[in-house]
Image (spheres, helix red, strand yellow):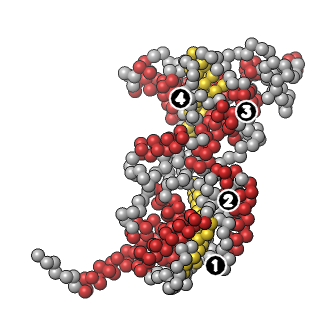
Amino acid sequence: MTEAPLSPEYEAQIEEQHRQEAERRLTDPLSTATFLDYRGVVERPHLRLISDEIGRIATGHTDRLQIQCPPQVGKSLLAAVWAPFWWLARNPSDKVIVASYGNALAVTRGKQIRKLVQRYGWRYGLELEPGSSAVNDWSLRTGGGVRSAGVGGALTGFPGDVGCVDDSLKSRAEAESRIVRERIWDWYSADFLSRLSPGAPIIMIGTPWHEDDLLQRVLKQDGRVEEGGRWRVVKLPALADVDDPLGREPGAPLSHPKIPVDDTAAMRHFWQQRRKETSARDWVSLYLCDPKPMTEALVSHTLLRERTHLPPPVEPKITAVGVDPSGGGRDMAGIVGGFLGTDDRVYITHDASMVGPSAKWARAVVYLAAEIDADVIVFESNFGGDMAETIIKAAWKTARDKHPGDKRFARVAPRVKSERARKGKLLRADPIAGEFEDDRLRLGAKLPELVDEWVTWRPTDTDSPGRIDASVYLAYHLLPVRNESAEVVQHPAAAPAADPFAERFGYGFLSPGARVFRGPPGRTR
């Protein structure tokens, strides 16, 4: 049976409905993309947030937007392909500059945008100018167009009404090169900015590589909006931090275009696999979006790589959990586990550090203690005193009551021991750094966040990383007392109150700025 043809009036009605829907979807790039290519474009929470932020540029809420994301999460397709097309659909006479780290990638971006114009431009009156065949420099009949260039490439003769910089660095080698970073900055300052018309907005999206890369340097120069500066920054790490822009709980995984949005377990597994496969520095910078300087640290990446043994080659004699409690639920509670091996070395094997209220971090402490069959839980008691001990013991009892058949909690509870630090962080951490150097302290697992704190914390820093303190207390409790005596730099009669760290690790009674002497005479760190 042949269906009757649609009447011209009905066809016109359907066409008008499509036109109105197409116009309505121009609020932001992702809404446009999912309408035009509903089979090929997926919506994820992080992409929705990025798109909404780009949409705020069109309404004049901001003119400098920076998005920091891990690699391969769909940010470039949205911000460097669909966003320029969306902008042209709204502003067909505007010229768009799209820059990427290499000319080949820039050409690909230009080709992708042009293909969108060829496929969907008719809905918005977009049509390529006859003879405009270059994939990296093409124009529309309406006067707008796109110039795509590699970072460092020429932009002369092409004024831009909006600029997009997508991943200015392509590798760790480039990120570590001061010459490359300066070249990128010179290009941005002299070539890119000089081609923008007055009031032209900039979208800068990328993966942070270095504390002095383009993403970080523009923030140092122009500042963040919340600090009275110009740039609105949206940071979306693989695992959420405090005050996450997506509203995730600390530690919650970032969504991924290739993983179903409701499969949190698969997303967490994916990022944890990346964490295991990636060096500590790259995990923290590329995936947690928090690049840090590597100078003046107590230990180096090279040393900690040498001190990592997977799996530990010995059996444990004593197992413990070290805890640096947090106050108020917004700071990081350091929670690390490890053991003293049969070779009289300490191996740090677990890191359960987290942000959260006392009940939450105490629960993490006792579950870690149960997992590794800890003999003792050592916590720092400078702030809160006996309160932390009470909370930890209560958490053990709650876990035991909640899991009555679980053998991990049926045993006698581990001893809970407090330690009070009488010295500043440097004088606490420096002797433990020496134990890494002397190969008495090792890592028995890949613990990139812990490694990052050790290799980036400097004595001049005002913050107090919880993982360092927790590992210090763990090592202090487990390491055997050295047989040899240490060299003392001040007579005990003139000394302040005894410090347990000094008694065990032999840095004696130090005056401010004094160096630490360890082991046999003549050896210093």
To which quarter of the image does residue 404 belong? top left
Choose the circle earlier in sequence order: 3 or 1. 1
- How far apart are the alpha carbons under marks 2 and 3? 32 Å
Provide the residue designation for mark 3: 425
Is label 2 in contact with label 4 (beta carbons under 8 Å)?
no
Q: Which mark is residue 158?
A: 1
x 49%, y 55%: residue: 73
Between circles 3 and 1, the one closer to the viewer is 1
Q: Nearer the viewer, mark 2 or mark 3?
A: 2
Check disc 1: other Cα within 10 Å, few if <14, some if 14-19, many if 20+: some
Calculate the distance from the C-alpha at mark 4 to the C-alpha at mark 3: 22 Å
Q: Position of residue 468 (x, y in %)?
A: 66, 33
Quadrant position of residue 475:
top right
The residue wearing badge 4 is: 365
Near-viewer residue (275 or 203):
275
Residue identifier under label 2 = 214
Disc sitting over residue 98 in the figure: none
Looking at the picture, which amino acid does disc 2 mark? Leu
- Residue mark closest to the camera, 4 vs 1: 1
